[in-house]
Image (tube, rainbow, N blue to C red):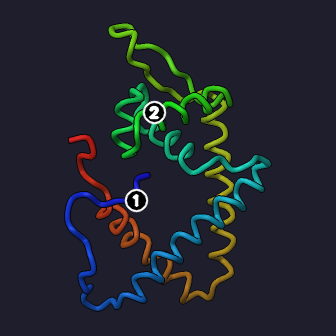
Amino acid sequence: MGDTVATEDVTARPVPGLDPASTAALGAVVGELHRRLRRVAARHANCLPLPEAQVELLLLVRAHPDVSVKDAACRLRAAPNTVSTLVRDLVAAGLLHRECAPADRRTARLRLTDAARARIADHEQQRAALLGAAVSRLSPEARAAVVAATPYLTRLADLLDDPDPCG
């Protein structure tokens, strides 16, 4: 879910200045950093980590309050029944409100609960503290390189986004 780039064919073209092994290593290390940070932050926040798909949905709802299930599925590039299952589980966990839209009772609108907002904030605080502590253990040169790379990694992530996933 959300791992494909549909805007252009990206098959096996060489990247100037970056060999395929380096490209693969970059993807692997970014993924591993994300997984480790997520697990450790959840452990420090004293909660079990949510499945990644649930986290993606919660973050989408935070960014787009009152999003419909159909629109959430489109934005996440997931099947509507998959998102409906995620919604059901998150509502049962007390992390999501699902309410029918007044104009169309068939359309459900999604909002975070206070518990979800608190959990996300706690998790983000734990992640920032853990990442800050790890970065502080790097050499000054390595710290500077990591900090300097941040805007480029942000841009790289932006380049993977489809500007209009539902269009």
Determine whether 3 is above or below 78 in the image.
below
Q: Mark 2 touching mark 1, by CB under 8 A? A: no
Q: Element under label 1?
A: loop
Q: Residue at x 40, y 53 (%)?
A: 2
Q: Residue at x 50, y 82 (%)?
A: 144
Q: Nearer the viewer, residue 155 or 10?
A: 10
Q: Element under label 2?
A: helix
Left or right of residue 40, residue 100 in this image:
left
Q: Please state the total of marks drawn on the protein image.
A: 2
Determine whether 151 is above or below 163 in the image.
below
Give the image quarter of residue 116: top right
> Which residue type does callout 2 highlight?
Asn
Q: Earlier in the sequence, mark 2 or mark 1?
A: 1
Q: Residue furthest right?
A: 46
Left or right of residue 70, residue 138 in this image:
right
Which mark, residue 23? none
Q: Residues within 10 Å of mark 2 (few under 14, many from 20)?
A: few
Which mark, residue 3? 1
Q: How far separated are the C-alphas under marks 2 and 1? A: 19 Å
Residue under label 2: 81
Residue 98, percent from left and from top: 52, 21
Q: Nearer the viewer, residue 95 or 121?
A: 95
Q: Residue at x 39, y 26 (%)?
A: 68
Residue 50, percent from left and from top: 65, 47
Determine whether 87 is above or below 130 in the image.
above
Q: Nearer the viewer, residue 82 or 30?
A: 82
Residue 163, percent from left and from top: 24, 51
> Which residue type does callout 1 highlight?
Asp
Q: Residues within 10 Å of mark 1 (few under 14, many from 20)?
A: few
Determine whether 14 is above or below 81 in the image.
below
Q: Residue at x 43, y 39 (%)?
A: 63
Residue 137, percent from left and from top: 68, 81
